[in-house]
Amino acid sequence: MTHAGFLTFAHALSTVGFYLLAGVTWCAALQVTLTRNLFHSALWLAVTLLGVAGLYLYLGAEFLAVVQVLIYVGAILVLLIFGVMLTARIADPAVPALNRQALLAALAALGVGWALRLAVRQASALPAGPVAAVPLATLGHGLVTTYLLPFEVLSLILVGALVGAIVIAHPERRR
Amino acid sequence: MVPLSHILTVGIGLFAIGLFGALSRRNAIGILMAIELLLNAAALNLVAFNAYLGPGAPPALGQTVALFVIGIAAAGAIVGLALILAVYRQQRTIAADEIHLLKG
């Protein structure tokens, strides 16, 4: 195979991979919302998050893909599973997963999705092709220069959330 | 690469699914998971715009904001779970439609 032919082949392969990844992500997301067992729901959420990380890789955002795996799958998901274990009657078949307004919710979600899709379709000039991938150094440099203030505010928010969570979830002392 | 509108459509689908979950789940932790889906859809769109917008746009702005979205999502999950645990300790349930302390 010639070099140009190989490039075309790799290009087609990555395009097919994108649609496969998108389909897997959608199906896993549907499972997250529809599965009765909340623990299985959390596992499907892991599949969804990994799928989104793969999409980040496709879009040339390697650092974000790593952050997604580390923070979402590594931290938030474990936290959610802790919450499931501590509170829910996870495998109780008598407890319905959805509430009475599920049909209305589905209609609302379809409506919002349709409106957003219409907006994308009507956007006059979407850029056709991607530009060169952003080097990691640019991202890091931006975080300590242009976006320094939001970065610091975010760390404040995280500390506040941590302290607040401890205060809220701390068991009350017996008086 | 696929056209930008296809990637945006993937984000829209994720958003719609997350919205459905957030509105229809009974379990509060299920609602929290659906909200994570919503945030992921938004971050995906940000990264997509970052990859496709031309040299006029500030470099790495979309990726930076997506990073912030992930950070805020972490903070939200922490506080949400703490609230759910506190409610569970009081009410012995976390089904969102069984918690009606403030209902007259």
Image (cartoon, helix red, strand yellow):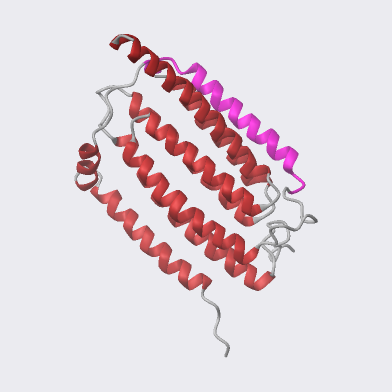
> Vertically, is A107 above or below B88?
above
Q: Main secondary structure of the magenta part?
A: helix
In the image as oriented, which residue stretches furthest toward the bottom? A175
The answer to whether residue A122 is magenta is yes
Q: Quadrant of the N terminus of chain A?
A: top left
Q: Residue at x 50, y 32 (%)?
A: B11
> Vertically, is A52 above or below B35?
above
> Left or right: B23 with respect to A123?
right
The answer to whether residue B35 is magenta is no
In front: B11, or A135? Answer: A135
Coordinates of residue A146 in the picture (x, y in percent): 22, 42
Q: Quadrant of the C terminus of chain A?
A: bottom right
**Which contiguous range is marked in magenta?**
A99-128
Q: Residue at x 65, y 53 (%)?
A: A38
Numbered circles on residues, count:
0
Tell me where residue A171 sits by quadrant. bottom right
> Left or right: A80 with respect to A151?
right
Coordinates of residue A130 in the picture (x, y in percent): 33, 21
Coordinates of residue A76 in the picture (x, y in percent): 47, 54
In the image as oriented, which residue stretches furthest toward the front? A1
Q: Residue at x 39, y 19 (%)?
A: B1
Coordinates of residue B6 in the picture (x, y in percent): 48, 22
In front: B3, or A11? Answer: A11
Q: Residue at x 55, y 21 (%)?
A: A118
Tell me where residue A143 sits by quadrant. top left
